[in-house]
Amino acid sequence: MVPDLDPLLSRCPRLRTLRLGSIAVADYRDELRVNSASLHELVVDLSRNWTRHRHVNIVAPMLKQLTFSFVASSVTISVMAPMEEKVRWDCSYCTYDRASIVFGLWRLEQVTLQTAERQGQLKICSSHALHSEGNTFVQEIEKHMIAEFSVLELHLIANGHVFGALMFHLLGVIRICRSMQRLKVILNRSQVKAECPFGCPCEPSYWRSQTISLFALEEVEINGFEGEDHEFDLLKLVFKCAPLLKKMTVKLSRKASASTKIYSIFNAYSSVECNVYHNSREYIVWQALSAYS
């Protein structure tokens, strides 16, 4: 039990590294404070006792490395550390929390930001959400972006649903589209493929005509491509919105096979290096080299 860290840290003027794991503040407090002028590295793990801490305040002007793991549940976090060089920020969302962050039928499960590799990661799965909170969905993701990143890794549990509208909703976030140079999409499928009901909210009519500016995007990898119509539409939109794209890699799912449709799309963009792999065996089945390679 840690009632108050301030008196302890004030007695350690030369402290360089502090690790706080599975800690809890006193019952009468709902705040965790870390205030140190000497800290260079801080590790905080609140992933097991997330109900204890409603407010987290970190003031460390010399901090260079920050690792923070927590479960989102109305927690507010303030970080003042202008010297940060490496950040690992990991936020999980409870699947049983009624305040889940959703967009249509999609639920946000995890957000990870890692500046050591300048990589961001989002994990999203389909759910039975009955309402859409598009603005809240974007705002929730933006508040985690405590640093710019150039690589976005997106994990989607689609369960048979169309994910094009969701992806363009995410890629349109200002702090994503202006800095993202590499995009990796991992499509996870359930063993039993569900069929979308008529009028399913996963496929609004507008997304195929959307346009966003992905001017920094240079490389895309899609893992688990099954060759459905909406996946081909997504490929076309990425090509259209990323004028500086240099490389496109598609790894087919175990059940999919290469088709002339994907080749015709790639042939239309001869300046981009395009590769198709059979995902289960990792061998290349088609390749078109960029004219600039």
Image (spheres, rainbow, N blue to C red):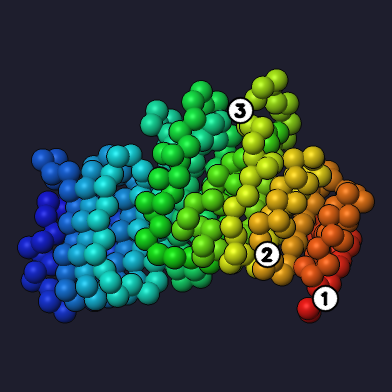
Q: Amino acid at mark 3?
A: Pro
Tell us which disc is closer to us: 3 or 1.
1
From the top left corner, tell me how far across and down residue 10 is, in percent: 8, 69
Q: For residue 56, say whether it is visible.
A: yes
Residue shown at the point (83%, 67%) measured from the top left: 270
Left or right for 282, reference 208 = right
Q: Residues within 10 Å of mark 1 (few under 14, many from 20)?
A: few
Q: Earlier in the sequence, mark 3 or mark 1?
A: 3
Circle 1 residue: 291
Helix, strand or loop for disc 1:
loop
Q: Which mark is residue 243?
A: 2
Using the image as rendered, state which of residue 96 and residue 49 is in the foreground.
96
Residue 164, by quadrant, is: top right
Query: What residue is pinned by disc 3?
Result: 201
Vertical order, 247 against 53 (above or below): below
Q: Residue at x 54, y 58 (%)?
A: 177
Res. 151 visible in picture: no
User: From the image, which quarter does the C terminus lie in?
Assistant: bottom right
Marked residue nearer the N-terminal end (1 or 2):
2
Residue depicted at x 46% and y 51%:
111
Q: Are marks 3 and 2 in contact (CB under 8 Å)?
A: no
- Amino acid type, residue under disc 1 in the picture: Ala
Classify mark 2: helix, strand or loop.
Answer: loop
27 to the left or right of 200: left
Marks 1/2: CA–CA distance: 15 Å
First-in-chain label (3 vs 2): 3
The image position of residue 86, as x and y in percent, is 40, 71
Kind of residue indicated by mark 2: Pro
Judging from the image, what secondary structure is the residue with disc 3 in? loop
